[in-house]
Image (spheres, rainbow, N blue to C red):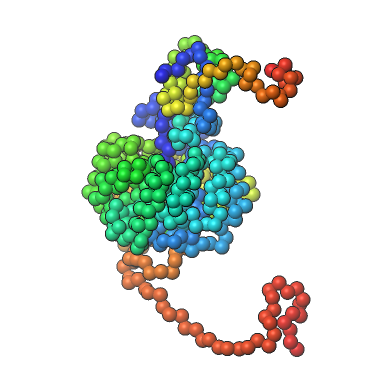
Amino acid sequence: MTILDARPEAQVGTKQSFGRTPAPATADTPKPGRLVDLFEYGLDSPICLTWELTYACNLSCSHCLSSSGRRDPRELTTEEAKGVIDEFERMQVFYVNIGGGEPTIRPDFWELVDYASEHHVGVKFSTNGVKISPEIAQRLVNSDYVDVQISLDGATADVNDYVRGPGSYDTAMRAMQNLYDAGFENFKISVVCTRQNIPQLDEFKAIADKFKAQLRLTRLRPSGRGADVWDDLHPLPEQQKELYNWLVAHGEGVLTGDSFFHLSAYGDALPGLNLCGAGRVVCLIDPVGDVYACPFAIHEEFLAGNVRSEGGFHEVWRNSELFARLRNPQTGGACTSCGFFDSCRGGCMAAKFFTGLPLDGPDPECVRGFGEDALTKRKEADSIPKPDGDHSHSTVRGPRRDGKPVTKSRPVNLTLSLRRPEAPPVSACEIDPLAGFRP
Amino acid sequence: MPIELDSAWDLHPQVSVRPEPFGALLYHFGTRKLSFLKDRTLLTVVQSLADSPSVRAACVTAGVSDADLPKYARALDTLVISSMVIQRPVTPSPVIQRPVVESPVAERAS
C-alpha cells in the first residue's frame, strides 16, 4: 500500500533553492523553500489517496494493515462510491490507490474503475491477483487510466506463502503472467520488506524484469494484524542497512512509496519527498467511508471524519481538526538534537504509535538504535495501543504478540429440536399488528 | 529539444493542472509522473500557453519581465523534458479546423 509513488519528477521553479537548506522560519504563509517544507502545511487536495473499497478478502495475510477478511455491512454502496469519485474529480485528485481487503472481489469493482476513468480520476489498484484472468488483463491493457499492482511478499512460494497464505504465490504469478501476455507493461509488483524476504531483493528484481514490471518495495508497518507479527517479521538492523544500500544502488528504478525515509540517516536521502505525508499530502478512506490521516493509522486517534457526513470528503480534507493539527512542521521532540533529524524527520508516525512509542520520539526502527531502547521500555510498561476494528476471518493465525498459544476455534454446542409450525412464519414485512397472534 | 520562445507550445493533452498555495501540481496521465510548479507566475505562463501564439507571448501575459525570461525558459525546458509541455503541431489553416456548425456570430465575436 502506498503513499507516494508518483515521484516529484521535476520540481520546476525559478528562484527557490531545491537543496537541503532549511526554509526560512515562517508564519502562517509558507515562503518558498524546499518543497517538503511547503508540503508540511498541506495541500488543497491530496496528491495521492488510498481508498480501501472493502474489508472482504480471499486471503488472511498475517501482516494485513487493515485486518481484512470479512466484508463490513456498512461499506459504501455503489452509488455512494460514485459520489466519492465525483468529489475526487471536482477536487482534481489525479489518481487514487485502491486497495482493501481484495478490492476486485467487490461485485461493482469494474463498474467503479470504469466510472473513475470516465471522470478523469486515475486508478491504481492493489490486488493479490485472484481476479486477473487473461480476459481482465486484456481489458486493463486498453485503459490509460488504470494501473495494477500485484502484491508479492516472497520471491519464492515458501517465503511468500509464509505471510500471505498457501497458494497465494501461484495466484500472484498467474496474474503477472496474464498481464505480461496481454502486453500490460510496467505494472507494479509490490513487496512488503520483511526479515524473511530481504535476502531475496535481487530475485524480486529479476521477477519484475521478467514480466516487464516495476518493482515496488515498502516498509512493514505494525498496523492492523501487522502489529501481531511485527516483532517476528520486521527487518533486523543489519538487514536495514542492506536494504538501504540496495535502494541506493537501484535508485529511481525501484519505487518505494516514500516509505523508507527513516533510513536516510545512513547517508544520502533516498529518492522521494522524505516526509510524513499523513493528512498533508496523503490520507486513507476506509470501506465504511472513514477518513484517516494515512493508510497505516486505522485508529480513532487518526480519524478525521467520514465521507458520508455533510460536506463529504472535501470538508474532511480541508477543514477537519485533526488534519489542521497535522499540517504544521513536525516537532522533533527527543530527536531534535540528533544530527540526522533533517533527513529522517523522526520516521513514521504510525510505526511509532502502534509500537507504543511517543510520536515525537525516535522511530522503532531508528537506524541509530534509539528506537530499540524505547521499545524495550514500552514492552515493560505494556502500553501498546490496539488497532481499531478487526475484520479478520475467524481462522487460526499467529503468532500472538503476547506469546500465548493461538487458540483453535472451539466447537459451539447447539441443541437442535424439531417443532413443526402450525402456520407459515409471519413475514418481517407484515404490517398487521396482530399478525401471527393466535389467541 | 529546448523550448523555442517564438514558437507555439502547449500543455500535453493528457496533463492535468491543479493550482496549490505554493504554485501548482501537474500530473501526466500518460507517463504517470508528477511535476511541481513552485511559482504562481510560472503557473500563469503554463496556463496561457494554449491561447498564446508563442511562449514569449505567454510570458508577457503572465507579466514576466525580459530579465526574468531566461529563468522561465529554463523552467519550461524541464517541463518539455518530462513531456508535460509539447510543441504545438503545425496545422494547415485554422479556418478549416473550425466546426462548420459553429455560429457565424460567435466567429465574428472572436
- Is residue A67 visible in the rendered structure shown here? yes
The C terminus of chain B appears in which quarter of the rendering?
top right
Residue situated in front as seen by the camera: B85 or A45: B85
Q: Quadrant of residue A65?
A: bottom left
Residue A319, above or below A127: above
Left or right: where does residue A118 sit relative to residue A200? right
Left or right: where does residue A211 sit relative to residue A107? left
Q: Quadrant of residue A224?
A: bottom left
Residue in the picture at 56% in, 54% down: A108
Residue B5 locus on image (x, y percent): 48, 14
Total number of numbered labels?
A: 0
Residue A370 locus on image (x, y percent): 28, 49
Residue situated in front as seen by the camera: A353 or A234: A234
Residue in the picture at 56% in, 18% down: B91
Residue A215 locus on image (x, y percent): 34, 44
The N terminus of chain B appears in which quarter of the rendering?
top left
Residue A113 locus on image (x, y percent): 53, 47
Left or right: where does residue A30 sit relative to residue A264? right
Residue B55, above or below A137: above
- Is residue A304 visible in the rendered structure shown here? no
Farthest residue, direction top: B66
Residue situated in front as seen by the camera: A278 or B29: B29
Residue in the picture at 35% in, 61% down: A167
Residue A208, above or below A419: above
Residue in the picture at 38% in, 37% down: A272
Left or right: where does residue B28 sit relative to residue A343? right
Residue A91, above or below A169: above
